[in-house]
Image: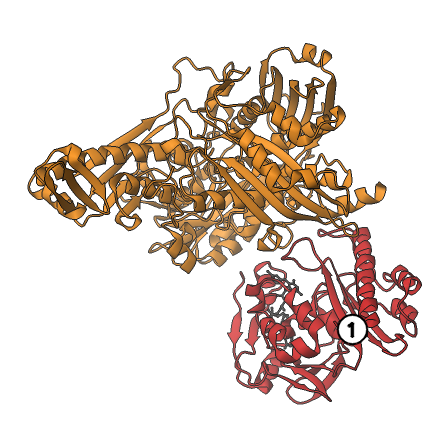
Chain colours: A red, B orange
Amino acid sequence: MKAFDYERPSTFEDACRILHAAGGSKKVLAGGTDLIVKTRHKVMAPEGVVSLKDVPGLSDISFDPEKGLFIGPMLRLSDVETADAVKTQYPALAAAVATIGSTQVRNRATIGGNICNAAPSADSPPILMAYGASVVIGDGKNEREVLLEDFFTGPGETVLRVGEIVKQIVVPAPPQNIFAIYIKAARSALDIALVGVALLAVFDPADRVVKDLKVALAAVAPTPVRSRQMERIVIGNKLDDTIIEKAVVESCTDACSITDIRTTEGYRDTLVETHTRQALEAARSWIEKGGVL
Amino acid sequence: MKGNIIGKRIPRIDSVPKATGTAEYTVDLKLPGMIYGKILRSPLPHARIKSLDVSAAEALPGVCAVITAADVPMGKFSFFQWLADKTIFSSDKVRYVGDEVAAVAAIDADTAEKAIELIQVDYDPLPAVFETEEAMTADAPLIHDQESNIGFKVERHFGDPDNAFESCDFVVEGCYKTDRVAHCCLEVSNCVASWTPEGRLSIWTNAQAPHTQRQEVARILEIPLQDVRIINSHMGGGFGSKLVMDMKLPIAAVLSKKTGRPVKIQNTRAEEFSTAKTRYGYTMYVKTGAKKDGTLQARTVRVIADNGAYHDKGPATLNFSSMMFATLYNIPNIHYEGMVVYTNKQMSTAFRGFGNPQLTFACEVQLDELAEKIGMDPVEIRRINANTPGQKLQCGAVVPTCGLRECIEVAAQNIAWKEKYNRKDKLRGVGVANMVHTAAGGRYYGYNATDSFIKVADDGTVSIVTPGLEMGQGVHTVVAMIVAEELGLDMKSVKVLSNDTDLTPYDLGSWGSRATFVVGNAALATAREARVVIIETAAKMLDTKPEFIDLENGMAVARGPGMPEKSVSMGKLAAYAINNMKAPISVKGQWADDIPEDWDIKTEFVKNVRSFAFATQTCEVEIDKDTGEVKVLKFVAAHETGTTMNEMLAEGQIEGAVMQGIGFTLMESMTLDNGRVVNDGFLDYKLPTFGEQPEIDVQLIETGDPHGPYGAKGIGEAGLVPTAAALANAIYNASGIRVTELPITREFMLNALREK
Ligand SMILES: Cc1cc2nc3c(=O)[nH]c(=O)nc-3n(C[C@H](O)[C@H](O)[C@H](O)COP(=O)(O)OP(=O)(O)OC[C@H]3O[C@@H](n4cnc5c(N)ncnc54)[C@H](O)[C@@H]3O)c2cc1C
């Protein structure tokens, strides 16, 4: 492995300054489960890494019923998965995070790393997008907030500029009467997604109409994508057989699957359809039961 | 059998260091002054080397040596020297992506890697061939200087199959294929080589067969055998991949000689997937005929084995599968034709089962096809044809003990065969397959014997020096158990020494399910010798007769008619022998397989095996109609153990093997791009994990064995032999889709379901 510098600043501002001065040749180091693996495999060759371990406050998590959930990017996935607020208020996020890697990986990997690595197959972005999450980005002087669905620009690429660090992940407070689910299709129990389907439906318990629907897909495009065509078909309707079938037909419209070493385009599309149908069926039965188990 | 120790659930003696991460493997070894070697490998599957320039690498600071074909002996080598076809480095042409071209040694691994990248090689690409049947065509590129790419052939024959097929009521024919899968040892292939000032070479490596590797190293380096010493540590898996010397051993040796420093070479995981060899991929044309009543009359097969670019364990693999082909059932007419065919891929080698898992997949799937044609239940046809104890088979083999019928009964019962077979609901189904495997290695070497030594120390511990090669299967625990059982000791009082060819007696290594059988027999003989000496010593010390002495709980106890009970501890006894008798207790014992003098492997090929072990596996699967996923709900693995030495170890071996079989059947495959392994890491080479593990109901059937220690049979490989066929048959029962090629991927299943 190519040698690189290791720095561990103790303030956010210092971290940004180092990154800025390096002009893009240094990288933020979180858990390293993507960064170090890629460096080993020569996919990346950073001149240096900047660990955020000593920057205070980046592993905090808090929940406010009005404002929502605030997660520090350095929070380990295993801590996200088991946080009370996540388990009770955003169970589909907990479930999605639990599908990432193995226990060992989740004990090391962070939520910020999972997002900033910007892998099309990453498991937390689709469900976070469905929950309407955004990220707070800082450069040591200014801050900006970007909706997660606008954050990704390509495989491994984001809107982050040199010297910018993701400071926080903000998930709006969940509305009343929702159903959310993440379904991951993989080749084995320990695998990255061949396809991931995240779905969040907001419904009216009185007439069972879906008032809002967000579906986001993993591993079927250069970035995680919203399945907007399909959302439009469902919104304003009750989930019945006809609507579900219509929606499933459109489930791949916003995707552009490819054939790669893991599987074929055709099988990916089939998986999207299959798991979209499963997600919609699950939503239907949830809604029909009035939103209780 | 249940002794004080044998037959008990005894934890492995290496479990604490392994569970706590303190066990040291060869990869952990660092010697003072050690430097790091790295091999430059061919990036092309088939090419002429036009020129090679190492000057830039040599000039890189930190580089200690660069070597090429000019620096090493260039005699051709193979495990079977009559098939020699590979030199340490390729000098004229490369034959697979990964072929060794040059090597460097540098002060650290990163510098070595940088230096490798600085070596300039000019290649002239040649057309390459990757599929065996393509490689057999007249216009295929020739990989070696010979008339065709067929490496060699094996033929076995008895009876008159052609005529027999004529008189059969039912005949089925088909082609079956298995893929080349990787052993996936957690510890990659690695070694450290170092020379003494006197000119003796020590190599630390994870070898499954240190004594034969020692011979191989001496042979390829053209140095006297006495100048080579192989040292083992804990070993992170072998499965057959570490039987034959890897070229990194002589390369490290030459680098070490050149630099005067210990040199370590260790595969990256990508190198391991690309060069550490695979299971022989088999293409099998099988034909089976039976009478209306289900009795098998004739069977023929043509096996085309994918050799890869060089020879390795091909003869052993083809021979062994021929034998199992002829002995699983008592079929009077057999023809077996096997060949290995060169392709521009990494070499194939032994892998748990030596060709038997491949051929059993084909034969046991075909048996289901036959049963269906006859209109017979798959369990029934297996019951009818099962061998019985004491039977002399038409092929000449004798099975003195045989638990196949018991295996079939319990495997069928525990999967609830009667209720579940052909239920045809919810894409659920059950499948069954039988197998036979050697319980005692093979006799190809014409030699199958070993010995061990025991000494009793004055602190009461008993040490045994054994060649038993521990690669994770538990043979050291078994050896310690045998000693403890015979000498009335607890497990803590027995020490097992076994890591150095200077120390251990000659033995052929851990393969072919032979270690417990061969090494265990030698340990038993040695322990019994020790018992005699200990008892004689105790009789002197306690002033009584040997027949009144018993060994129990670490004591020699004298009990006789009309005498008060007397006892002495093992430690005191050993001290007495040393100090008072001037005869420290140390003994030797041995075991030798009585291989017939006039044995000819060609005509009496079935005699290659000393003892047979039979098994039946059944399983239940459910197929997801939307994704094609085959969910394995349950496995029942009923295996004949002869005598179960240690249930925990036996269950562990079989569960692990079933999981390996599930991977072989449903997941594992090497993806190649112009000969380069693309999925050269665990991200894309899918291996089953705990997440895939179904309930595995292991049933151990004790039938005894006339030759094994305490009647034990080897069970190291058997667990995955019938797994693929049981799964494929269950898939058919669930879906009506007959699968004849492995692996059975989800995508394949989904497409097949949609076509139906
Ligand atoms: C065996 C294994 C299995 C895996 N399985 C899965 C899986 O199933 N699903 C899945 O989604 N992923 C999987 N991964 C990938 C990886 O573990 C996750 O993406 C993980 O969340 C990355 O987090 P990290 O803290 O290790 O990131 P790092 O490797 O430290 O960083 C990843 C990238 O993000 C950047 N970065 C990190 N934090 C910030 C920040 N705050 N601001 C700006 N940039 C930042 C880094 O510079 C780097 O480019 C797996 C990895 C392994 C090794």
Report the side of B190 relative to A174 (left or right): left
Q: From the viewer's perspective, is residue B21 above or below residue A213?
A: above
Q: Nearer the viewer, residue B363 or B424?
A: B424
Q: Secondary structure at mark 1?
A: strand
- In depth, the one of A263 and A187 nearer the eye is A187
Classed neighbour count for the residue bearing mark 1: other residues with Cα under 10 Å, few (<14), some (14–19), many (≥20): many
Q: How many discs mark residues in the rendered view?
A: 1
- Residue B370: x, y in percent? 72, 25
Residue highlighted by disc 1: A179
Q: Is mark 1 within 8 Å of ligand 1?
A: no
Q: Position of residue A75 (x, y in %)?
A: 59, 77
Quadrant assignment, res B170 = top right
B21 vs B327, left or right, is left
Q: Quadrant of residue B53?
A: top right
Task: Where is residue A79? Give x, y as percent.
Answer: 59, 75
Q: Residue B302: name its quadrant.
A: top right
Question: In the orientation shown, which residue stands out farthest toward the front?
Answer: B562
Residue drawn at x 9%, y 41% as measured from the top left: B542
Name the quadrant of the C terminus of chain A: bottom right
Q: In the image, what residue occupies the spot 10% across and 39% down?
A: B563
Residue A206: in sight, yes or no? yes
Q: Position of residue B406 (x, y in %)?
A: 54, 32
Q: Nearer the viewer, residue B128 or B610?
A: B610
Amino acid type for the residue under numbered disc 1: Phe
Tell which quarter ligand 1 is in: bottom right
Chain ID at mark 1:
A
Residue B98 visible, this angle: no
